[in-house]
Amino acid sequence: MVFSDTHDAYNIAKIWTFFCMIILGVYFFTQKSSYMEIDAIGMWVLSCLVILYLSREKTDQFSDNQKKIIIVIGILMCLFSFITIPLGITNPPYGIGELSLLLSGIGVLLFGLLNFRSLVVPVSIPFIAVLGFSVYELFVRNEEWITAPIIPFIVQITISMLNLFGIRAIADRNFISFISMTGDPVYLAIVSDCTGIWSLGTFTVTVIIVLSSFPKSISKKSLLLIGIGYIGTIFANITRILIISLSGYYFGPKGVIEQVHVHVGWIVFSLWLVIFWYYYFTRQIGISFFNKRKVKDSENNQ
């Protein structure tokens, strides 16, 4: 059976979104979560939102030969998710990266079989992103000189912001130290992971998802907004470091600061992504997430 009308595509997109959120939710609550897991889930949420939006319009279709090629590609993507670790492309154990590869492959296979051409690109972006991050990680881990010039800037900004809070902090190369309210010294090491390089990579992936799905939205204004998005991502990372520092100042070097270090990063970055893309979707693309008709009806009734 071929699903070709908008109603069917939208229903399939809703089922697909529900399926993805269930799979990713089960993974998140049963496995040890980290910053990378949160990034991946956020990427999938954005992918599903784009799929839901595009499915509400009439979807383009493949030719018979194109459809066969897409189906084969989807199958190969699924199989590829199980051999990336042996090939050394991703690291063991089987985790969110490999699961994303598998989900993308299933999505490409599904939308290829149903001939929903418009939905193949957004569902394949996480697959491309995982491979890109694998290459990116290999490059960054072996080329720390990329982040080296950024570390002094992060250290200086953090020192200045702590001083604004009345905290006398000093810097020694990439180390920040100050005395907490408990009387214990707190030492923070600013390393390459603290530069926000991974957040910038994740933000870049979200930009690719949106621009490839909504090419008509690309303009001078959209490029300016994306530039602001990168700046905001940098400041979101600085905010993360500041919150970690303040938790150490108020509660000492043990206990709370460790939990804050684990969770504050994905919370701050996720909030920034939601705020930025909500603004971009509503102001630049013109998508409404709320039913304006209901609002107008209620105003008329009054």
Image (tube, rainbow, N blue to C red):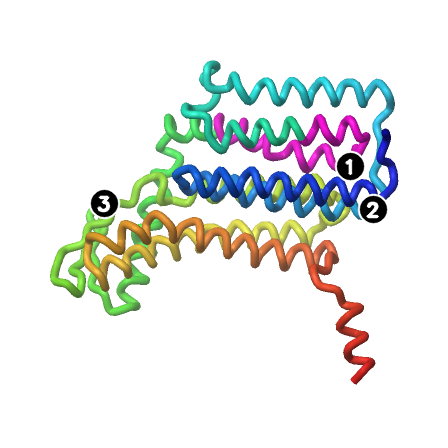
Towards the viewer: 41 or 172? 41
Task: Give coordinates of residue 239: x percent, y percent.
Answer: 39, 57
Which residue: 68% across, 39% down? 16
Contact (Cβ within 8 Å) of mark 1 with mark 2: yes
At x 52% / y 16%, what residue is drawn?
A: 83
Rate crowding at label 3 as few (under 14), some (14 to 19) or many (20 or more) other CA atoms within 10 Å. few
Q: In this view, does 287 lie above or below 201?
A: below
Location of residue 219 in the rendering, given as x and y in whole percent from the top left corner:
72, 50
The quarter of the picture where the C terminus appears is bottom right
Judge the density around disc 1: few (<14), some (14-19), many (≥20) Cα neighbours within 10 Å.
some
Mark 3 — residue?
173
Q: What stretch is highlighted in magenta?
A: 107-135
Q: Mark 1 and 3 residues: CB-CB less than 8 Å, in contact?
A: no
Residue bearing mark 1: 118
- Residue 272 on the magenta span: no
Q: Which amino acid does label 3 sit on?
A: Arg
Disc 1 versus disc 2: distance between alpha carbons? 10 Å
Hey, which residue is sitting farthest left in the picture?
A: 183
| Mark 2 neighbour density, 10 Å: few (under 14) some (14–19) many (20 or more) | some
Separation of disc 1 and disc 3 at Cα? 51 Å
Residue 57 circle label: 2
Q: How many marks?
A: 3
Q: Which residue lies furthest to the bottom in this view?
A: 302
Q: Which of marks 1 and 2 is nearer the N terminus?
A: 2
Q: What kind of residue is marked 1? A: Ser
- Discs 3/2, front: 2
